Structure formats: C-alpha cells, structure tokens
Image: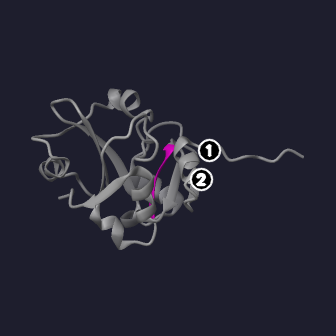
Amino acid sequence: MAKNKEPKTNAMRILDRMKISYKTFTYECDEFTDAQHTADLIGAAHETMFKTLVTVSPEPAYYVFVIPIDSELDLKKCAHQAGVKSLAMIHVKDINSVTGYIRGGCTAIGMKKQYPVFIAEAAQNYPQIVVSGGHLGIQIELAPQDLAAASKGTFCDITR
C-alpha cells in the first residue's frame, strides 16, 4: 500500500536539514487568502500568526520583515533597522522573481537569495508562532528563535 507523503517545501527541507522541530498545517487554498482568514482556517490564534513582507530600498536592495498579521510595518523603523534611507513594499508582481515564492506563500526561510530578515520583537512573547510554509495552503508552526536561526533573522521593533 502506497504511503501518502506530505509535500515538502524548500522551507521545510531547510528546517529538516537544520534539525529544527516544526508542525505543519495544510488547508485548501487555490489563490491568495488573507492571513486572518488563514488563521481562522487552521485554528491559530491571530496573535501567534505572522506574515512575511518584502521591501525594497532605492539602491535597490531587498529586506524581509516578519510581523503579526494584525500589525502594520512602520517603514521608517524598518529603514532604520536595515540601515537605509527609505523602504517601500515590493510590487506584488515582483514577489516571485525576488523571493522564489508567490503571494500568500512567502516565507523568510529559503528565499532565492539570503536577504536581511527582521522579525517583530512581539514574536518572542510566544513559545510557538505560525508563518507561511512556502506554498499556498501550508503554514508552519515553530519557535520564534528557530525561525530566526533558519532565516538568519534578528528581532527588533518594526511595527506601529
């Protein structure tokens, strides 16, 4: 009898290789769904669910931010943390070419290139947080410190 194998995303393979413990949640999703709806679908508390946002500086250089789903990026704080004059959100059409992921499936772990990653300090308030698993319909729950290790991220004040 054939065993149904759960598909592995690049992010999951990296976590496995690093021997980082995580739990996956899968749900039916054919197109982008906002993070609040996704949290409700998988039964995750909104405060433990985080979204990944990608910004660009004028140079251009890219920076990745992981924040609670009910928060907004403070682009001035983000630029200060990144050490640049200003930042803007990348255009939706550029997400795949920059990160290797699609809108709604973007995670700070295993992007095409290693961009600087900044994680909202609020993540440290929880033993586990939930982030995209690198594909629509897959979320990963892991310790915030493990997300930081896998993404080479740092915790800082980046929201308003």
Q: Is residue 133 magenta?
A: yes
User: Residue at (53%, 58%) from the top-left corner?
Assistant: 42
User: Residue at (68%, 47%) from the top-left corner?
Assistant: 6
Q: Is residue 130 magenta?
A: yes
Could you tell whether 23 is left or right of 55 in the image? Answer: right
Amino acid tagged 1:
Lys
Q: Which residue is mark 1?
A: 8
Q: Report x, y in % for residue 32.
A: 44, 39
Decide: is 106 above or below 147: above
Could you tell whether 5 is left or right of 18 in the image? Answer: right
Residue closest to the eye, 146 or 102 = 146
**Which element is circle 2 on?**
helix
> In the rendered image, is residue 30 in sight?
yes
Q: Which residues are magenta?
A: 129-134
Q: Which residue is mark 2?
A: 16
Residue closest to the eye, 7 or 19 = 19
User: Is disc 2 surrounded by few (<14), some (14 to 19) or many (20+) residues within 10 Å?
Assistant: few
User: Is disc 1 surrounded by few (<14), some (14 to 19) or many (20+) residues within 10 Å?
Assistant: some
Question: Predominant secondary structure in magenta?
Answer: strand
Decide: is 4 above or below 23: above
Q: Are marks 2 and 1 in contact (CB under 8 Å)?
A: yes
User: Residue at (47%, 59%) from the top-left corner?
Assistant: 40
In which quadrant will I find the C terminus? bottom left
Amino acid tagged 2:
Asp
CA distance separating discs 2 and 1: 10 Å
Residue at the right extreme, as displayed: 1
